[in-house]
């Protein structure tokens, strides 16, 4: 049995579509509708956001609001690190996925000598940098930041001096860079990538399990193979973006993509993964109730979260 702690990061400045900052509260509303007292039983801390920056024009087009993202990284990293040092298990409930870069930094801060594996359940690889991004949104860059990857070979943008300087600081949050290597990553459900990202996935032979493989081989085998790929790691972080699920399930996320996994597959996968003793942190992100109908995505997400919590406290 683990002592859990929720870390709420209601930030959405890394996303291109508005509304993800309300995702955590939407999950809480789903919990109330289900008659659950989970959020009363588990201690929660809330990270100060920089969402006021949404009311200003972004000054750095190839890394929008990166100054605010840097602050979010640092605060999230500190909270995750402190939680782990107290031998508690952090469950990060985030708005947009850029937060994950701070989570990874926090795990490394608490365990600087540990080899950290990342299981990234997502429709997107999130391995862009300011040099390659087509949108400038930081939720597409947390893996690259954690790798210390610029991908200059596929450069399409010329970021200004401020962006380059802040991107450098972002990569170094926690005073450790890189925090992970390519062989420490497992992607599950990734299916919407740009050519610049595909280059890195192929060059470094990043372990990837497609939606078709999940359906063909079953969740148990995928989870087992994913964990087996990370046997060289001391610790494992599981990051679950709700857009890994098929867009037919719900529109309640900023970047829905067809041909995803089902809610049942997602729940079973997350539960199976957190059973492994090396898993030290779990994160859920990108629920956007403003795009949803009857809070369906938040309800699906709450059911998955409830299963994960039950497994960790069993």
Image (tube, rainbow, N blue to C red):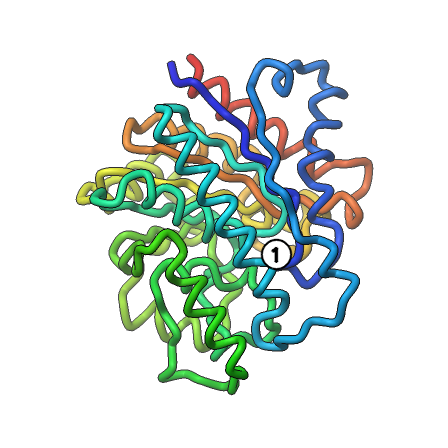
Q: Is residue 196 left or right of residue 66?
A: left
Residue drawn at point x = 46 percent, y = 61 percent? 125
Residue drawn at point x = 39 percent, y = 29 percent? 274
The image shows a total of numbered marks equal to 1
Q: Is residue 24 left or right of residue 124?
A: right
Q: Is residue 262 above or below residue 203?
A: above
Residue drawn at point x = 40 percent, y = 43 percent? 106
Residue to which mark 1 is pinned: 258
In terms of image quadrants, where is residue 210?
bottom left
The quadrant of the image that shows the N terminus is top left
Residue 246 is situated, as x and y percent measured from the top left of the image, at: 61, 48
Residue 28 is situated, as x and y percent measured from the top left of the image, at: 70, 28
- Mark 1 packing: few (<14 Cα in 10 Å), some, or many (20+)? some
Residue 215 is situated, as x and y percent measured from the top left of the image, at: 45, 44
The quadrant of the image that shows the C terminus is top left
Q: Nearer the viewer, residue 129 or 293?
A: 129
Q: Nearer the viewer, residue 253 or 236?
A: 236
Q: Is residue 252 above or below residue 3?
A: below
Does residue 215 appear in the picture of this structure? no
Q: Is residue 227 left or right of residue 103?
A: left
């Amino acid at each position: 049995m683990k002592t859990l702690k929720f870390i709420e990061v209601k930030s959405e400045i890394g996303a291109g579509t508005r509304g993800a900052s309300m995702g955590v509260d939407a999950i809480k509303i789903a919990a109330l509708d289900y008659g659950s007292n989970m959020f009363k039983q588990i201690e929660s801390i809330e990270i100060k956001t920089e969402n006021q920056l949404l009311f200003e024009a972004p000054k750095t087009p190839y890394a929008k609001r990166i100054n605010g993202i840097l602050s979010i990284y640092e605060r999230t990293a500190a909270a995750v690190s402190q939680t782990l040092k107290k031998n508690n298990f952090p469950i990060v409930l985030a708005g947009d996925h850029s937060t994950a870069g701070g989570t990874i930094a926090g795990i490394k801060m608490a365990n600087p000598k540990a080899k950290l594996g990342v299981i990234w359940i997502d429709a997107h690889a999130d391995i862009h940098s300011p040099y390659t991004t087509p949108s400038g949104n930081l939720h597409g860059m947390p893996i690259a930041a954690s790798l210390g990857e610029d991908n200059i070979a596929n450069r399409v943008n010329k970021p200004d001096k401020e962006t380059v300087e802040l991107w450098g600081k972002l990569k170094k949050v926690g005073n450790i860079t890189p925090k992970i290597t390519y062989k420490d990553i497992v992607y599950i459900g990734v299916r919407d990538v740009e050519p610049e990202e595909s280059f890195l996935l192929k060059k470094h032979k990043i372990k990837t399990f497609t939606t078709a493989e999940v359906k063909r081989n079953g969740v148990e085998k995928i989870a087992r193979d994913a964990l087996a790929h990370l046997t060289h790691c001391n610790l494992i972080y599981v990051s679950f973006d709700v857009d890994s699920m098929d867009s037919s399930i719900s529109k309640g996320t900023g970047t829905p993509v067809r041909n995803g996994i089902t809610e049942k597959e997602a729940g079973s996968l997350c539960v199976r993964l957190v059973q492994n003793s090396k898993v030290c942190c779990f994160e859920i992100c990108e629920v956007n109730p403003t795009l949803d109908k009857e809070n369906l995505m938040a309800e699906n997400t709450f059911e998955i979260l409830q299963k994960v919590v039950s497994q960790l406290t069993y």
